[in-house]
Image (cartoon, coloured by chain):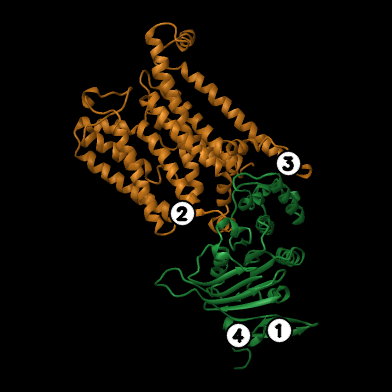
Chain colours: A orange, B green
Amino acid sequence: MRRQVLNSYLYFFKTDNMNNLSAIGKIRKKNTAVIIILTAVVILLALLCLFVGSSRMSLTECFAALAKKGSAAKIRIIWNIRIPRLLAAVIAGAGLSLSGLIMQTSLNNSMASPSTLGVSNAAVFGANLSIIAFAGGFLSTGNNLTSYTVGANPYATSLMAFLFSTFSILLILGLCRLRSFQPGAVVLAGIAIGSVWTAATTVLQFYATDVGLSAAVIWTFGDLGRATYRTDLIMAVVVIIGTVFFTLMSWKYNALLSGDAAALSMGVNVDLLRFISMLLASVITAVCVSFLGIIGFVGIICPHVTKRLLGQDHRVTIPVSALSGSLLLLLADTLSRCLGNGSALPVGAVTSLLGAPFFLWIIFSREESHI
Amino acid sequence: MLDIKNLHFRYSRRSPMVLDGVDLELRPGEIGIVLGKNGSGKTTLFKTIIGIHKPESGTLKFDGTDLLKLNRRQRAEITAYVPQRIQFGAMTVYDTVLSGRISRFGLNPGKHDRFAVEQILDDMRLNDLASRNVEKLSGGEQQKVAIARALAQEPRVLIFDEPTGNLDLANEQLILSEARRLAAEKMISILISLHDLNQALALGDRFFFMKEGRIRYAGGPEMVTESVIREIFDADVRMIDADGSRIIVPVQNGAHGD
């Protein structure tokens, strides 16, 4: 299997008999270059993020702390706060963006994303229920409401958020099984069920105490500061499994772009592919949102910009969407820490503020995608 | 040979039969034209042959192999489909055609697959368009790409659902002559649904007239008569002999003196 994944990337480097098809070779080289450059930019930006923060550490102090030298506090800041945080940005950015891309392809709908399908709304309800009804597990290192969560299991809120979003997507997929996964039905069911979660959250918040309400609202803000090595590891495992599966299925997604009937006639088991893809994409979102809170719009912006600029071939859009998701979240997080004057602004708000103008510019400035 | 016997299909147990005992035979290299009014079951028949719909009863065989017992991939190596509404993603023509071979390569295409695609592009004279975005091509060019993609499956039966629906005259002729060439050169059985009766007469070897989920008449060109057309389409036509070939002309209501 590893070889298959490798092969799908090596495909870009293969030069076969293409005398009259040299333009295809050029497109492949361009796509390869984009992937390599994006990877380099993500790594560079991740390094840069390491040196930005409220503690005003100098560059030398940062390097020293990175090598586990210098004061214990500074080593702790770098190793226990900044590194888990930037890893979370890279992993969750890639995961959320990929989830959006796969949902859009699977449902043949450009508006499909974790938030439009109600996955995020269900997570919010689960977290609210945990915080408001059970006073449980508010997971934060940045915005810690210690008095409210003493004695609570720090994973309780995340677990509730995860359970509800998984339950929600299973409910939608189960309902849609009745109509053999017609993409339109999945999207509409997602919107309907999403609105039920939002309504239930409102009712819950109506009965909440002031402290409970503020804790619940702060949870929804989305904060990379909640990440720890353990949460990063859990997110990484899920995102890697998803990425490997999606990469292996690249050609099937390409076939799906031709519509259900054509894909079926080409031998693709469309219903099964759609079910597994939706489930996996939702689980990735559920895990990221459960640990970090709502980080909206990444799943819409990054795949769309990628498709606009490079076309829809999934051998390209899968790696590029993942990398651009990481990039957006890294940028948003760095900016949120620079602007927050001591405490970071909610990263979910910054992704939208940063991404939306760029998104609009891309939509209105180009008439056609450049393959 | 494609051999269909007593095929029944309906969308649910409560709904009426859409295919109500279809019988159809088509030999290699033959072009079969399916004719009938809208809603007579043509598209449903095609979708049942390629495996989108599962028939309730009846047999569906190709050269003695029961198509209903094959899995999707095996089936895609026998039947290919050019749908009525063609849809593409923003990919190059080359990769779009290559995606047609997915039933043969599974996860990643090999050298053999790319060689096959280059042959097909050459054959369909699509070489110059190979690196173009398929979404930006004209209707006729897209239709050719859809055919090329279907051919990449190396099928034995090729099914076209109203291929000339959105095309201008030149492209119509181009697509129909491609169908004729493919049947003759590659000995593929081709099943086409058409609305234009004159196009049908010019192209077909065998004709299948469908009404209410059944094939009412099947046979060669001699079977296409005024009375058959009147019965199937509930419309009046006249057949005119023009230099040895027959032309079908619609008659306006009341113009024939009833």
Q: Amino acid at mark 1?
A: Glu
Q: Is residue A241 above or below residue B1?
A: above
Foreground pick, B120 / B163: B120
Question: What residue does disc 4 label?
Answer: B230
Residue positioned most to the front: B64
| Residue A23: numbered disc | 3
Q: Residue at x 63, y 64 (%)?
A: B166
Q: Are the residues tagged 4 and 2 within 8 Å (C-beta)?
A: no
Disc 2 and disc 1 on one polypeptide chain: no
The tag on residue B222 is 1
The answer for how far apart the CA atoms under marks 4 and 2 are is 40 Å
Q: Say whether disc 2 or disc 3 marks the residue closer to the N-terminus.
A: 3
Secondary structure, mark 2, is helix
Same-subunit check for callouts 1 and 4: yes
Residue under disc 3 on the same chain as residue under disc 4: no
Task: Return the x and y of residue A279 as percentages of the image width and height.
Answer: 42, 45
| Alpha-carbon span between mark 3 and mark 4 | 53 Å
Q: CA distance from mark 3 to mark 1?
A: 50 Å
Which type of secondary structure does the marked residue at label 1 adopt?
A: helix
Asked if residue A230 lies left or right of residue B216, the reply is left
Indicate the amino acid at tag 2. Answer: Pro
From the image, tell me which residue sits under label 2: A183
Residue A54 quadrant: top left
Tag 2 near tag 1, CB within 8 Å: no
